[in-house]
Image (cartoon, grey):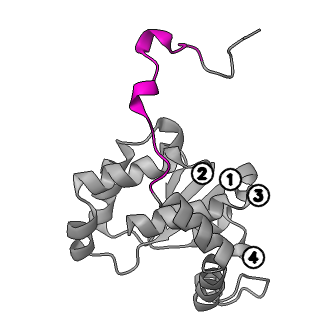
């Protein structure tokens, strides 16, 4: 599951619009139960998942969670302890109603399955259509080649080259004045 999430984030990163404008995620937890929690939400997996977002070059504008079961509230509280305040402020929950989601996200970008029955405007299609389109896009050869290259193991970090604590500037790079 984490490999799939990472592959999707890497694929999204290929689109410069996502890098510039940022991404908005919607997490629909319909059907989420204790069996999912036992498999997914070990401490190691939570740390692994929360490390994906800060290391990805996409700017996360908002993360919306819908249809949260009571057990997920506790999981979300745990996850929030591992992320920076800026990301905590961008995580929004919507309970079991999508009405508050409509205030945050334009309805035209949502799948028909998430829209009210009386909505007659444009949408992104049904969930099945969105999945089929994205499956077709992510399996195109340039994308597959890019993802396989990233997963090849040839990229990494040489910790011996990491500067010592006294060599690291204490100020933010945005405030740094270097001649």
Residue that label 2 marks: 60
> Looking at the image, is mark 4 or mark 1 earlier in the sequence?
1
- Could you tell me how far apart the alpha carbons at marks 4 and 3 are, in whole angstroms? 18 Å
- Residue segment shown in magenta: 153-171
Against 147, residue 138 (above or below) is below
Decide: marks 4, 1 in contact (CB < 8 A)?
no
Find the distance from the CA under tag 2 to the CA under tag 1.
5 Å
Q: Quadrant of the C terminus?
A: top right
**Is 155 covered by the magenta stretch?**
yes
Q: Determine whether 143 is above or below 73 in the image.
A: below
Residue corresponding to mark 4: 108
Label 3 or label 2, whichever comes before in sequence order:
3
Do the residues bearing badges 4 and 3 touch, measured as CB atoms within 8 Å?
no
- The quadrant of the image that shows the N terminus is bottom left
Q: Is residue 170 left or right of residue 82?
A: right
Q: Looking at the picture, how far across and down is residue 109, in whole percent? A: 71, 74
At label 4, counting other C-alpha atoms closer than 10 Å, the crowd grade (few under 14, some 14-19, many 20 or more) is some
x 51%, y 56%: residue: 92
Q: Which residue is mark 3?
A: 17
Q: Which residue is mark 1?
A: 22
Instruction: Say whether residue 85 is visible.
Output: yes
Residue in front for this viewpoint, 103 or 125: 125
Name, please, the residue furthest toward the front.
154
Q: Secondary structure at mark 3?
A: helix
- In front here: 143 or 122? 143
Label 4 vs 3, first from the N-terminus = 3
């Amino acid at each position: 599951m984490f490999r799939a999430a990472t592959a999707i984030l890497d694929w999204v990163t290929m689109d410069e619009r996502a890098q510039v404008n940022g991404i908005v995620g919607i997490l629909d937890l319909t059907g989420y139960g204790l069996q999912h929690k036992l498999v997914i939400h070990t401490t190691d997996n939570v740390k692994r998942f929360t490390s994906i977002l800060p290391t990805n070059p996409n700017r996360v504008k908002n993360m919306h969670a819908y249809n949260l079961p009571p057990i997920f509230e506790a999981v979300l509280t745990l996850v929030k302890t591992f992320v920076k305040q800026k990301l905590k402020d961008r995580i929004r929950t919507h309970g079991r109603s999508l009405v508050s989601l409509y205030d945050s996200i334009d309805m035209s970008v949502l799948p028909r399955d998430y829209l009210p029955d009386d909505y007659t405007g444009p949408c992104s299609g049904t969930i099945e259509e969105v999945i089929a389109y994205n499956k077709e896009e992510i399996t195109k050869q340039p994308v597959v080649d890019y993802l396989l290259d990233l997963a090849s193991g040839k990229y990494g970090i040489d910790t011996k080259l990491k500067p010592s604590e006294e060599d690291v500037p204490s100020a933010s790079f945005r405030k740094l004045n270097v001649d």
